[in-house]
Structures are given as C-alpha cells and as structure tokens.
Image (cartoon, rainbow, N blue to C red):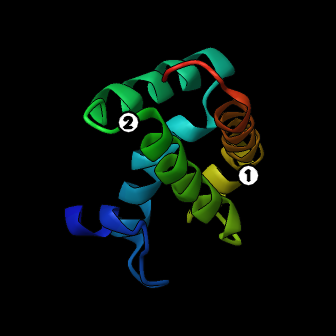
Amino acid sequence: MILKTKHHQADPEDLDSQIMLDADLAILGEDESSYRFYAKGIRREYAWLSSEEYRSGRIDVLKNLLQRPRIYFTAQMFEQEEAKARQNLLAEIELLCSSDSDL
C-alpha cells in the first residue's frame, strides 16, 4: 500500500488502499494556515532544488492533482474535503506563479 502513495492511485475494489491514500492526502483539505505550514515543509524537504526548479516541479504536481476527477477516493473525504483541497491547491499555484521571492 505504501508504494501506492507514489502515484496516489487505487483500484476501485481496494478500499484499504483508498482509505490509506485519502489519509495521506488529508492535509490538502485542511484550513489555510495548516495547509501553508505543510507547503512550507514540502519546500524544506526539497531545499536542494533551486527556487525555479522547485516552483516548476511543485506546480506540475499540484496541477496533476487538480486534473484528477476526484482527489479523494472515499465518499466521506470527497464530500468533506474535496472543495477545500482544490481551493488550497489553486491558492498554492497562484502563490508559486506570482512569487518573486526566494522560496
């Protein structure tokens, strides 16, 4: 199941993986402050990349998540967190695209 977090994909009949992947992506649907703290942690994790490399790669990841028909697999997470997750991802993309400061 851990390997499924690489692409965040689960088979329709694999409820255990769906629940685990939803838990892994739960932070995306948190309040703005918690999400920004998480995003800053991701930047620290990739501190070895230049600002431009990070921006480009991070935007790609975020856009890929947004292109999915659903971020969350389970009905409960979809209903409770999907809209906020999409809002957080869009806000981070906007910040990354407009940021002139070093990340």
Residue 71 in sight in this render: no
The tally of labels here is: 2
The image position of residue 74, as x and y in percent, is 57, 62
Q: Name above or below for residue 95 compared with residue 65.
A: above
Q: Amino acid at mark 1?
A: Glu
SS at badge 1: helix
Look at 63% across and 52% down and name the residue there: 76
Camera-nearest label, 1 or 2: 2
- Left or right: residue 80 versus residue 65 is right
Most foreground residue, 60 or 33:
60
Find disc 2 in the rendering and name its residue. Answer: 50
Q: Quadrant of residue 15?
A: bottom left
Q: Name above or below for residue 28 compared with residue 32.
A: below
At label 2, counting other C-alpha atoms closer than 10 Å, the crowd grade (few under 14, some 14-19, many 20 or more) is few
Look at 76% across and 40% down and name the residue there: 87
Most foreground residue, 6 or 12:
6
Find disc 1 in the rendering and name its residue. Answer: 79
Q: Amino acid at mark 2?
A: Ser
At label 1, counting other C-alpha atoms closer than 10 Å, the crowd grade (few under 14, some 14-19, many 20 or more) is few
The image position of residue 97, as x and y in percent, is 70, 38
SS at badge 2: loop
Look at 67% across and 55% down and name the residue there: 78
Mark 1 to mark 2: distance in Å?
A: 37 Å
- Left or right: residue 49 versus residue 52 is left
Q: Mark 1 and 2 residues: CB-CB less than 8 Å, in contact?
A: no
Q: Residue furthest left?
A: 2
Residue 58 in sight in this render: yes
